[in-house]
Image (cartoon, rainbow, N blue to C red):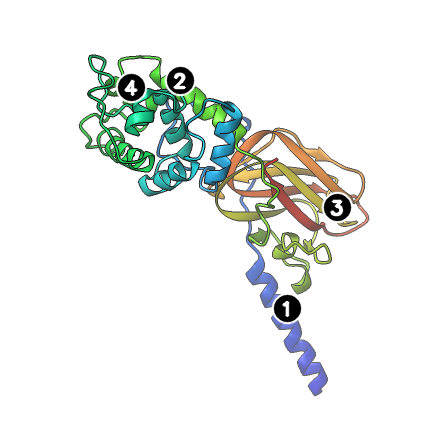
Amino acid sequence: MSNKASISAYLNVCVRLLIIVSIVMIASPIFDHAALAATTYTIDSYLTDRSGVDSITGAQLDTAMRTMRPSNNGLIGLGQIFVDVAREKGLNPLYIAAHAAWESGWGTSAIFIYKNNLFGYGAYDRCPYSCALKFSSKADGVRYGMTYIKRDYLTSNGKYYHGLYLRGMNVHYATDQNWKNGIASIMTSLSSKIPVTSTNLVLKKSAFSSSVQGFGYLATYANDGNIGTRWSSRGTGFQSWYADMGSSQSFNQVVIRWETAYAKKYAIVFSNDRSNWYWRGNYEYISSAGAYTHNLGFTATYRYVGVWMYEGPGNYGNYSMYEMEVYRR
């Protein structure tokens, strides 16, 4: 064998090995139309569940609070401390903001203004002002209040623990039985008003596919931000591609930029564990290559998002995708 032939054979082996390494097979479809995660909170939502809220910033939370209550709102400017304390205590920042809004009348109560007390700590029905504890700053009030709440109400051995949700907290925290409903309602409203982001949530994240055509068409080329590269499958029939966003993220729009070897029938899918996959409830049908924007019609909160392809146009022996982009609009 010539040196040229030896080098060619060696390169072919390397390419095949790279293809094998890059393939991650996905299990057969498991569809559950009712399991789509949304941003509606109830009195039984876990307050320690941070799915979809890890990426919320203080500025975004301030904007949401301002949108809900544009005037006479003393909570504006406290978004960052809500976010920071939520991260420290393992809580949902929307819960902290909603609790403060309910207890302090959106930062208009006397104990908020004069005592920096956001959560009614120490304020009893018999002495709502004089018994309320005074703090040196709003930040101190938030941190102290959430330390106490997490310890006594949201820890399994806490003396007032009745579950990780508002229904359980309401047993001892407030005599008003509408307390739990009011906070859940504010959480939902705040969630719907978190400003949208123009950030592509899957950009340059880890990506996986059921197959690749070759070394120049790896799964990661479909979310590298470069329209000059693309992922291509080896074969048609059922094929899959998905990206790992690293943690649960909220999104409601998916853009797919198909090459000429497009999938004429496909489904946009989501998962939190890569074992159970959910979809938007219908297949997508297209008849030409190009960019297609899919507005989901709901806010999904998942870690993995991708596309399952079922049928090609018939002119090619594979599927090929320039980019998939995921947004919260």
Q: Marks 2 and 4, Cα distance to the nearest angstrom?
A: 11 Å
State which quadrant residue 141 falls in.
top left
Q: Which mark is residue 294?
A: none
The residue identified by callout 4 is 170
Is 7 situated above or below 27? Answer: below
Q: Marks 4 and 1, Cα distance to the nearest angstrom?
A: 61 Å
2 sits to left or right of 219? right
Q: Residue furthest bottom?
A: 2
**Mark 3 falls on what kind of element?**
loop
The residue identified by callout 2 is 182
**Which one is nearer the viewer's eye here, 329 or 36?**
329
Circle 2 Cα neighbour tier, 10 Å, few/some/many (<14 / 14–19 / ≥20):
some
The residue identified by callout 3 is 262
Dot 2 amino acid type: Gly
**Mark 1 falls on what kind of element?**
helix
In primary-sequence order, the first of circles 4 and 1 is 1
Dot 1 amino acid type: Val
The residue identified by callout 1 is 15
Name the front one of labels 1 and 3.
3
